[in-house]
Image: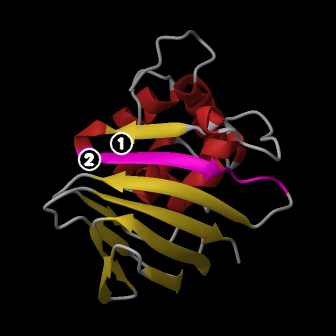
C-alpha cells in the first residue's frame, strides 16, 4: 500500500515511527519479532518502508507498543485541527483483508476519545490477539449492515442502528457475515 506521492507519505512516516518505537525501547528486531509474533524480515522491511503493514500485523505491533491503531497513525500525521473536514480525514485501506478505516476525529494529545469509521466487506474477518491498550472503552454503532463482534469471549450480533459498548481487556474479533458490507462508527476512549 505504498503512496506514490513522494518520500513524505503516510507509509514512509509510519515506517520511521515503527523503527523509532522499537529503538526507544532498546529492542532488537529479533526481540520485537518474539513479542509481536511477526517475522524479523517482515519487521525489517516495514521499518525500511519497503512493505506496508497489514491490519493484522499493525494490530500486533500496536498491542506490543500499547497503542490503539488510531493513536499510532495519529503519531505519523501532523497535529490535527479542531475541525477535520471530510477530505482531510486520513483513510487507511487493507484491500486483502476487505478493511477500510477513516479517522473521522483523529486522536489528539490531551483528549482521550476518537471516532473512526470502519467498513468491512461481506465475509471479512479481523481478529486481534489482545487489546491494544488494556481497558480501552469502545462504542460501536452500526450505520449499515451487520457485524459479529467477539469481545471478552462473548459473540454479539450488532445490526444496523444498534450500538455495542464495552471495555476491552483481551482478544477481539470483527466479522461481517454479509450478504453486504458493514459500515460502523467506532468510538474509542482511552482509560
Dot 2 surroundings within 10 Å: few (below 14), some, or many (20 or more)? some
Secondary structure at numbered mark 2: helix
Q: Nearer the viewer, residue 21 or 77?
A: 77
Q: Is residue 38 visible?
A: no
Residue 188 vs residue 131, the one in the foreground: 188
Report the quarter where the N terminus lies: top left
158 displayed left or right of 114: left
Q: Position of residue 63 (x, y in %)?
A: 52, 62
Q: Label 2, on which residue?
A: 97
Q: Quadrant of residue 51?
A: top left
- Measured from the top left, where is residue 110 in percent x and y? 86, 60
- Does residue 149 appear anywhere in the picture? yes
- Look at the numbered discs 1 and 2 and tell me whether their residues touch, using CB distance below 8 Å: yes
- Region rendered in magenta: 97-109
| Quadrant in the rendering for residue 157 | bottom left
Give whichever of 140, 124 is nearer the camera: 140
Label placed on residue 54: 1
Q: Is residue 167 left or right of residue 81?
A: left
For mark 1, give the secondary structure.
Answer: loop
Residue located 32% across and 68% down the image? 174
Amino acid at each position: 500500500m505504498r503512496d506514490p506521492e513522494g518520500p513524505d507519505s503516510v507509509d514512509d512516516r509510519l515506517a520511521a515511527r515503527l523503527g523509532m518505537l522499537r529503538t526507544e525501547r532498546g529492542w532488537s528486531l529479533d526481540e520485537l519479532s518474539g513479542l509481536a509474533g511477526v517475522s524479523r524480515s517482515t519487521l525489517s522491511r516495514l521499518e525500511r518502508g519497503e512493505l506496508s503493514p497489514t491490519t493484522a500485523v499493525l494490530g500486533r505491533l500496536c498491542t506490543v507498543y500499547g497503542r490503539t491503531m488510531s493513536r499510532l497513525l495519529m503519531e505519523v500525521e501532523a497535529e490535527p485541527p479542531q475541525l477535520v473536514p471530510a477530505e482531510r480525514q486520513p483513510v487507511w485501506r487493507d484491500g486483502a483483508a476487505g478493511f477500510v478505516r477513516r479517522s473521522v476525529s483523529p486522536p489528539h494529545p490531551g483528549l482521550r476519545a476518537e471516532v473512526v469509521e470502519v467498513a468491512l466487506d461481506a465475509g471479512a474477518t479481523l481478529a486481534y490477539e489482545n487489546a491494544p491498550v488494556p481497558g480501552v472503552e469502545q462504542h460501536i454503532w452500526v450505520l449499515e449492515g451487520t457485524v459479529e463482534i467477539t469481545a471478552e469471549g462473548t459473540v454479539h450480533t450488532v445490526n444496523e442502528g444498534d450500538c455495542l459498548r464495552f471495555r476491552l481487556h483481551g482478544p477481539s474479533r470483527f466479522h461481517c457475515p454479509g450478504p453486504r458490507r458493514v459500515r460502523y462508527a467506532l468510538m474509542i476512549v482511552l482509560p
